[in-house]
Amino acid sequence: MGHGAGKVILFGEHAVVYGEPALAAALSRGARAEATGDAGALTVLPWGTRVTLDEPGEGPAEPASDDRAALLARAYRALVAEYAAAARGVGVRATMEIPGGAGLGGSAALGVAVVRALDEALGLAREPAEVAALSLAWERVFHGNPSGVDSAMAAACGVALFVKGRGLEPVRLARPLHLAVAHSGEYGSTKVTVASVAAQREREPARVGAVLTAIGRLATAARAALEAGRLEELGRLMGENHALLAGLGLSTARLDALCEAALAAGALGAKLTGGGGGGCMIALGRDAAGAEAVCAALRERDPSAFVVEVAT
Ligand code: PMV
């Protein structure tokens, strides 16, 4: 049984694509996968999607559509191509424990779980960083130009600072964090939002460059606040990060409303997490009880909102 962790980005999404640091926390929820005898097939539950190495979309033209089955088939083919031919004789059955398109790193968690299931079936042993590097072949199909933060976190645990090309640096927290996580109900495509930031950066390099640098500075300041247990400061920095992301058009009215509801319920800070354009937001509680109170308020808008404790 292979596991890949979901993650929340605490600080630095999007700027991380351009080399700025990001802070992320691994979730205990993610994706699980096991090898089966259904050679060359990948089945993903609860979606009930089954794709094979030979279809759909096999041939000179890749499928133009972004539909999930076509993406899964392409990603699985890209991953299996990294292995020796024996991998074609293995089947994989996976189960998602988090939603996709939510900013929780679902596709990376699935990719890492699939790598671990294939590795186990083929008797291969790899370090987490190698698993993450291999699963990038999968993640590129979903994200186009991934920084690698999702894949690295999917193979890891705890909180870490991530810099593209350098990998993860574990961060020790002075105290655990209690976060409420809620979904806007809107599907956010990270591929689309990453492309939108790239287009804005091309049009207005000075403005967008300054925003990305400012986001990187917030991630650095947040790391120090985490290590010292300064939660109020952390909350304030989250609000600043959200405002900068919103300035790049990455928030939505529903994400903003969730953040406002969280702050009204006593959250120390709130922000969108992940690619944006929909998907999830996170809110920092003063403590466990505070996060539960925030979560109760968020459940009025998203009944599936949940609390995670992040500790190292
Ligand atoms: O939406 P998610 O969970 O895949 O988060 C992606 C994070 C980005 O910084 C927006 C993209 C990336 O590749 O780092």
Image: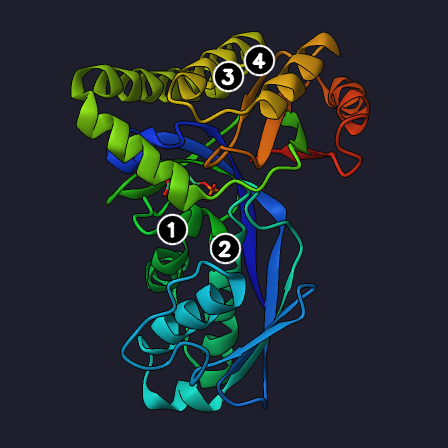
Q: Secondary structure at mark 2?
A: helix
Q: Rate crowding at label 1 as few (under 14), some (14 to 19) or many (20 or more) other CA atoms within 10 Å.
A: many
Residue 147 or residue 27, whichever sits in front? 147
> How would you rate the neighbour count of disc 2 (Cα within 10 Å): few for under 14, some for 14-19, many for 20 or more?
many
Residue at which label 1 appears? 143
Residue at (42, 21) in percent of width and height: 245
Q: Is mark 1 within 8 Å of ligand 1?
A: yes
Q: Are marks 4 and 3 in contact (CB under 8 Å)?
A: no
User: Looking at mark 2, is its residue's CB closer than 8 Å to ligand 1?
Assistant: yes
Spatial distance from mark 3 to mark 1, Cα to Cα?
24 Å
Q: Quadrant of residue 309?
A: top right
How far apart are the two marked residues, 2 and 4, measured between alpha carbons?
A: 30 Å
**C-beta proximity under 8 Å, tags 2 and 1:** yes
Q: Residue 16 appears in which quarter of the rendering?
A: top left
Q: Is residue 281 left or right of residue 166?
A: right
Disc 1 residue type? Answer: His
Residue wearing tag 2: 107
Amino acid carrying label 3: it is: Met
In the rendered image, the quadrant that contains the C terminus is top right
CA gap, disc 4 and disc 1: 32 Å
Question: Residue 172: where, in percent of width, then height?
Answer: 48, 30
Q: Nearer the viewer, mark 4 or mark 1?
A: 1
Q: Earlier in the sequence, mark 4 or mark 1?
A: 1
Which residue lies under the disc numbered 3?
238
Q: Secondary structure at mark 4?
A: helix
Q: Of discs 3 and 2, which sits in the foreground?
A: 2
Q: CA distance from mark 4 to mark 3?
A: 10 Å
The residue where tag 4 is placed is 231
Among numbered discs 4 and 3, the one appearing first in the sequence: 4
User: Depth-wise, is mark 2 or mark 4 nearer the camera?
Assistant: 2
